[in-house]
Image (tube, rainbow, N blue to C red):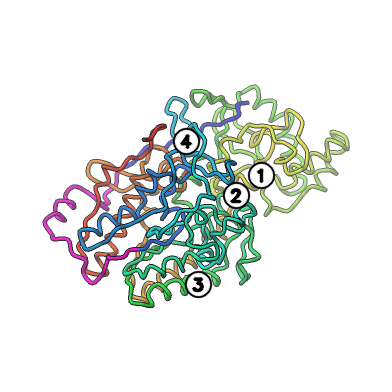
Amino acid sequence: MKKNIKWLLLVSLTVMAACNNDDNNDAQAEVPVTPGSAVFTKYIALGDSFAAGYSDNALFKKGQENSYPNILSQQFVAAGGGSFTQPLMNDNIGGLLLGGNVVAGTRLYFVGETQTPTNVQGKPTTEITARLTGTFNNLGVPGAKSFHLLAANYGNVAGVATGAANPYFARFASTPSTTVLADALAQDPTFFSLFIGGNDVLAYATSGGTGKDQTGNPNPATYGSNDITDPAVFANVYGGLVTSLTAKGAKGVVANLPYITALPHFTTVPYNPLTPKLIGKNNEAVGVATIKLLNTQLYGPLKLVLTKLGAGDRINLLSETGASPMLIKDESLENLTVGLITEFTPLVGAQTAAFYGAVFGQARQAKATDLVVLTTRADIGTAPTAANSGIGMAPPAPLNAFGISYPLQDKHVLIPTEIAEIKKATDAYNVTIEAAAKEKGLAFVNTKATLTQLANGGIRFGNFTMSSSFATGGAFSLDGVHPSARGYGLIANVFIDAINAKYGATLRHVDLGIYPIQYPATLP
């Protein structure tokens, strides 16, 4: 059984949707650029990895230069905008050093021959302890959640190793004890953008739901790194942010949050990749002989026993001709460990029965309603270790192939209950964001609608169509979460649309065609 099951690469589709096209650009060129009632003299951007320009699973100089705030700042110049500074990384390799030790890896690039995202070669040169001086207009901090923008010591280098501080903010915080918001307000912005909240659910989602939904818990200090932020906490924090940012009359633009189902990180790896046929170069399928053996020795007996326990719908035989779903653990299911041990003991002996009970007590086959996270593709078919098996031991062959003869674990898959928790929190955050925009008279960007459109047919510009299809759609980078350079250009354009509509400005779109959809292995 092959270690890697090739995930599906969907082709781009065309739809009638123009966020940027040649005709629109021509029309804009005839209108003088004006700021309307906005003042772009001092523009400050607050947010997380999206604002920072994070792409291909890393932060690097070229990605920062193509961040949507930097793109916006360039369009603001013609309408009175001033200079825009960013805390640039040292190189285009990406990654971070802490005391000379690598603590964040290099960026990904696409190896076309093997169709595999791969880390660029080289060691990062950006040292966290080498703090940058001066002020920065782009205060986007990868990994930041909403409440982190108000957290003192979030940029304290001394707290980075323990997780108490953020390594990216530690590079450019004005003082170790400052907050992101304080560094923004100290510059007296005349205009701001605020795009925050994605990480308040994203860490939970990318971890496969291994965190906790903290709804009802008002104390972020007690949250784990993969937890969902209480919507009431988010509302309080967000209200404080926009009140502070607008206190001296600054105008701004805020953006809501997309559903995770619009991100290819959660929609690329199919739930049913097991097939008896070869499915691509260097990707070997399960094979008919193996399927027959699995059906006889594992799936058949499990189906029989689970049926006796009233849960026969959890497992069906693998298909010898078509695609079959993977085995997963579903912690929301009733745990049938005891029943499995009881039923299997007369058949296979006490020791093997105990193993079956521990491994398959909450196992089922995946369904279309599950979301397999992108990073799981590297684990499908591999042998679980004592550390990641969930039972404290490395399972014996042949019951040691993740997703095939051994269930994928919690971190590998989002099940419907977890997806529902994420959606509920996202909806609540978005209500808060839109209400704040209305209360403070701010421009509002519906990024949820834009990314949903990318995931459902795509967005047309000129002779091209962008979609959320992994690697081929053009909108997202190779980590499946963060936009490509072209995707950031698209975000800048929808921000421009919102600013023009709210403040009567006539800012121009950027030409998306000048931005790449992938970065090469080597960048100057």
Tell me the magenta residue range.
Answer: 14-43
Q: Is 393 left, or right, of 51 in this rendering?
A: right
Numbered disc 3: secondary structure: helix
Disc 3/disc 4 C-alpha distance (Å) = 38 Å
Q: Is 274 left, or right, of 426 in this rendering?
A: right
Instruction: Give amino acid for label 1.
Output: Gln
Residue under numbered circle 2: 208
- Is tag 2's residue or tag 1's residue first in the polypeptide sequence? 2
Q: Nearer the viewer, residue 462 or 298?
A: 462
Q: Residue at x 74, y 42 (%)?
A: 360
Task: Confirm whether the magenta stretch covers residue 31.
Answer: yes
- Where, by quadrant of the figure, is residue 31 drawn? bottom left
- The quarter of the picture where the N terminus appears is top right
Disc 2/disc 3 C-alpha distance (Å) = 25 Å
Q: Position of residue 341 (x, y in %)?
A: 83, 43
Numbered disc 2: secondary structure: loop
Residue under numbered circle 1: 409
- Is tag 2's residue or tag 4's residue first in the polypeptide sequence? 4
